[in-house]
Amino acid sequence: MPDLSLPWPSTHHKATSVWWQDEAGLSAECPPLSGDREADVAIVGGGYCGLWTALALKERDPSLDVVVLERAFCGEGPSGRNGGFLHGYWSSLPSLVQTFGDAGALAVARASQGAVDAVRALGEDVWLREAGLLKVSAAPAQDAAVERSLAEAERLGVPEEAVAAEAFHFRRAVRFRDGATVQPARLALALRRAALAAGVAVHERTPVARRGSVLATPGGRVRAAAVVLATGAPPLPRRLTQFSSYVVLTEPVPELLTELGWTEGEAIVDGRMFLHYFRTTQDGRVLMGSGSGPIGRYRHDPASVARAERGLRRLLPSLAGARITHAWGGPIDVSADRFPFVGTLRDGTRYAAGFSGNGVGPTWLAGQVLASLVSGREDEWTALPLLDRRLRRPLPPEPLKRLGGAAVRAAVLRVEEAEEDGRRPPAVARAIAAVPRILRIQLGVR
């Protein structure tokens, strides 16, 4: 039987990331499924996407019998390992336009900004800080990414969503209004509590294998009228691939943050293809992440951890002496155009996947679309172009996807590191790095 549960390494949630160190004991585990039962909707996966979908279904119809089946502990997978950047798609406006056109781009961006309101409405302390998102340029080659964001917002008549800003010593910066940060484990636990309070049945330590409309687990079976796959791993090889992302976390350095003027908690990303992303925490630490891990199935990669630390020292030189206390990584399901897919598989299973390292906010959006899709509604959510969409340029088949992607990734990293150091990139690396642009295939997490 194929395992439909999370494909990520299964470790106890206390070891998943630093976010769980103070949170794992706050909630007793929900019991595994025992025996057979029926349900209106069965959701495979208890991360952000599965829990938001469960809540959205209960909001639409409180009488629905909704069951969530989670292989490990809710939020233990990528939902509990990420950097905690909570925002929608205003920062991706140029790519949105390229993918969905002007009207579709505005519809998706406007719909996505409800995620911050939804997190706030949970009414729990998830370390929510609403200080905006900054996109910065750390090298001349990154200037265009900032300028395109400003120009596209102006062209589409939404200049208030992206405004020129200053950020430390960076060359250029643009501030997006809808950016915030959270503590990922706290958010996962808050969603879990909200789902339980709404009457959702949650079963943890319950891996799932699919048999028609019956979900088989070691302890029993669920027969459901509708099944939602919310694990980030539907069988869509030409649409999805897997990268990995790694972060490092410093010791508390509140005095250095004051010197930098970084005291409001702004979330920041740079303009690289394999971007750096950095933020502060409530106790004055700095998290620096790099979305540049190996392509293919997730594995621990010390080189990617070292790359994240180099990014910290290079981009924030005043933190050169700050001690690194924690480092961890996790997988990212990356879609061919960097936007999620929501739809229906041939067997009738609903799914959402391809959040491309930006799932904290967009999983809420996908949950709304999935809930309306399962409920048979035709509304503003199912009208979004994320639903049942086709790719203009799908990913190449294996092994070309993996081997070619690895070669281009290595070349892009060499080019971008040289550009940040003020060096001319090697000619061979430049040529290989240009292949995706020539073929109009996107690579990386931007």
Image: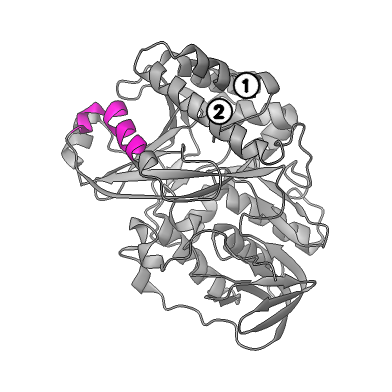
Quadrant in which residue 257 is drawn = top left
Q: Secondary structure at mark 1?
A: helix
Judge by depth and name the residue closer to the eye, 125 or 240. 240
- Picture residue at 35% right of the left edge, 37% below the top: 308
Cα–Cα span, label 1 and label 2:
8 Å
Main SS type for the magenta part? helix
**Mark 2 lies on residue:** 408
* Residue 185 seen in the current view: yes
**Mark 1 lies on residue:** 435
Q: Are marks 1 and 2 in contact (CB under 8 Å)?
A: yes
**Comes first in the chain, label 1 or label 2:** 2
Q: Measured along the vertical axis of the image, is residue 202 above or below residue 181?
A: below
Q: Quadrant of the C terminus?
A: top right
Amino acid of disc 2: Val
Pinpoint residue 25: horizontal percent, then vertical percent: 34, 73
Mark 2, Cα crowd under 10 Å, few <14 / some 14-19 / many 20+, is many
Residue lying at the far bottom of the rendered structure: 35
- 250 displayed left or right of 407: left
